[in-house]
Amino acid sequence: MTQPMAAVAAGVSLAAVAASLLLFACSDDRPTRIDDSGNLPDFALPDSPENVVENLSTAIRLRNVVEYAKLFDEDDYLFVFDSIDVVTNPNYPESCGYVGEIGWAEGCLDSPDVEEIRFEFDRGTAELLEPGDPERADESWRKIEMTEVHLEVETRNPQEPMDPLVYLVQGDRATLYLAPDPEELIEGHPVWRIMEWHDFRVGSRPDAVRERSFGDIKVLFDCCSAVGVDPF
């Protein structure tokens, strides 16, 4: 189930907020990501599906757009919106690609107006694909389930500077599909990348709150063709 924190979201024009988010500039106030040897000690080698998913968490936590972008296949990646989002938001596409994925990352992770990001989830192990999984997948693909997804994005409130806006995804799940690239090796092992990210809402939709899914957050922060409209 997803929702904004009511104490900070009430009375704010989300259309105005969305428009202001598209104008965010990059900030130099970021955690140190490279040690004295030039390495990135917080990131695991992307030589397994599990390591790539852990790096997804690390990249968001460290707000590292460069490393985030490396996790996805540039040519064939798809983010697939939850079906509820597509039905209830006519401006949403069914999916968006690599450009949209990096668009939201730059709009959120690189924004000086985003004051804090918290991202947690429970991760399963890599599994073989089953009937019902993407038809385009071959036998090399694997999938990993993410459950209890918690994403909290705290932003500056242009109308109430002392009262930040907080967008919250709570308890949702996702399925990540990953594939190895046999043409790119690291220490003799193929590099794995995310091919598809399927977003799923979980739980009820109470009338008293405006819910958020991960897809909602990505649209708000400059993802896909819905940018420039009021998605909420």
Image: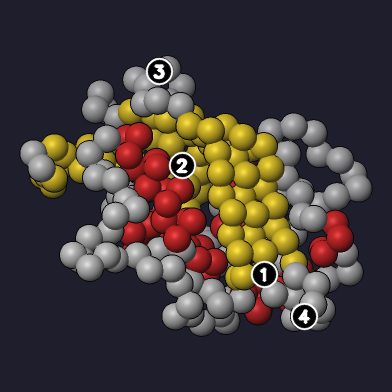
Q: Is residue 227 left or right of residue 204?
A: left
Closer to the chain start, of discs 1 and 3, is 3
- Mark 2 is surrounded, within 10 Å at the Cα level, by few (under 14), some (14 to 19) or many (20 or more) other residues, namely many
Res 34 quadrant in image: bottom left
Q: Earlier in the sequence, mark 2 or mark 4?
A: 4
Q: Position of residue 194 (x, y in %)?
A: 35, 43
* Picture quarter with the N terminus: top right
- According to the image, label 4 marks what residue? 161
Callout 1: SS: strand
Alpha carbons under labels 3 and 4: distance apart:
49 Å
Q: Earlier in the sequence, mark 1 or mark 4?
A: 1
Residue ID at (40%, 42%): 54
Q: Position of residue 92 (x, y in %)?
A: 61, 54
Identify which amino acid the numbered label 2 is placed on. Trp
Which residue position is annotated with label 1?
A: 155
Distance in Å between CA atoms under marks 2 and 1: 25 Å
